[in-house]
Amino acid sequence: MTDPVAASQPHHQQALDALTGLRAVKAHATGNDFVMFVDPDGQRPLNPEQVSALCDRHLGIGGDGAIRAVPADQDADGRELLSRWESEIADSPAHEPGERIWFMDYHNGDGSIAEMCGNGVRAFAHLLVTQGWVELEQGEELLILTRAGVRTMRKVPEGYAVGMGVWSFIDPELARTEASDALVMAAGLEDPRPGLSISLGNPHTVVALPDDRALEQLDLAQAPTVDPAPGNGTNVEFVVPSEPLVDQGIGAVRMRVHERGVGETMSCGSGACAAAAAVRVWAAGDGVDTWDVGVPGGVVRVSFLARPDGAENVELSGPAEIVAHLTLA
Ligand SMILES: N[C@@H](CCC[C@H](N)C(=O)O)C(=O)O
């Protein structure tokens, strides 16, 4: 029988050889880590083998995902997204006519593509700002194109705040008051628990646990099972209540996450937004609009803003750091 590890090594090396000379950074946002690079002329599209080789923690650089920053008009997917979101871009106060729009070409560590990454998009903005590709003063907004649509970014004291758009139930038939639409089982749970499936452009299923002990007992080395599973798979967030900042009206939860296409990660920004949205549904509109979500890699803040049509915009804020500049050998 073929040894899968031995068999994968030449394959990984071949994939990395094709990237020789690539200048990249290793970045993280609350411990959700990425291999990132700027591709100003759209000459370095990534294939799934290259992504999984780059993200391999032993044979590559290591990361939960890989992110390529490319001007949208220099990339086939970027051009398709530019035309799909044309009117939203034109109407955005964050965009000047003729200004370059950057596309976040996000890949999960296993080589699959995801629509959105809330931590990644903060790291993405930080890369563009620190390398001088964009200027972003406090108070200004930067428009970024993602596979989930147009997102706006601001610099804030704790790092960056990104407008994540509107959250929605994955099942459009689900009423605002319904507590669950799936059963979730994971190692460390005694019985399957109800989960609520929420979209932030990418899919999430959020599960409430009774206490910290239950959260700590989970073994997320294996993917949880979700029944019924959303068609394209799902990220699964487990949440428990945490100490709120009562005087400031800020709610708090702790969360662990198993990410689609990655495994357990130290943080998931879109997952934190989904977790806070689910908790608000379960709390039946108790009026708390801002939530601190504690993850193994730190804390991110999630805020909800009601829109005239009854939907809610979500903003995610938190830090982003670049830890190394490197050139692929
Ligand atoms: N870590 C991300 C989410 C990345 C994508 C996810 N694994 C998916 O497949 O949807 C975040 O911070 O949002």
Image (tube, rainbow, N blue to C red):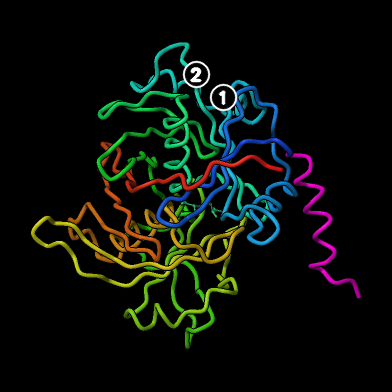
Residue sitting nearer the eye, 4 or 146: 4
Seen from this angle, which residue lies furthest top?
98
Q: In front here: 50 or 82?
A: 50
Kindly identify the residue that appears in the image at 61 percent across and 24 percent down: 79
- Quick one: label 2, few (<14), some, or many (20+) residues within 10 Å? some
Name which quarter of the figure residue 291 lies in.
bottom left
Q: Label for residue 71?
A: 1
Measured along the vertical axis of the image, is residue 90 above or below residue 1? above
Q: Amino acid at mark 1?
A: Pro
**Is disc 2's CB within 8 Å of ligand 1?**
no
Answer whether residue 7 is magenta in the image: yes
Left or right: 102 as drawn, with respect to 73: left
Q: Residue at x 26, y 36 (%)?
A: 308
Query: Which residue reaches farthest left?
Result: 247
Q: Is residue 43 one of those drawn in magenta?
A: no
- Quadrant where the C terminus sits is top right
Q: Residue at 47% across / 36% down in the picture? A: 127
Q: Cβ–Cβ below 8 Å for labels 2 and 1?
A: yes
Determine whether 65 is above or below 224 in the image. Answer: above
Q: Secondary structure at mark 2?
A: loop
327 and 198: which one is in front? Answer: 327
Residue 224, numbered label = none
- In the image, residue 87 above or below residue 288: above
Which SS does the magenta portion mostly show? helix
Give the image location of residue 322, x and y in percent. Answer: 46, 44
Task: Residue 169: give x, y in percent of width and height.
Answer: 43, 54
Start-end of magenta stretch: 1-19
Q: CA distance from mark 2 to mark 1?
A: 7 Å
Residue at the disc numbered 2: 100
Residue furthest to the bottom in view is 190
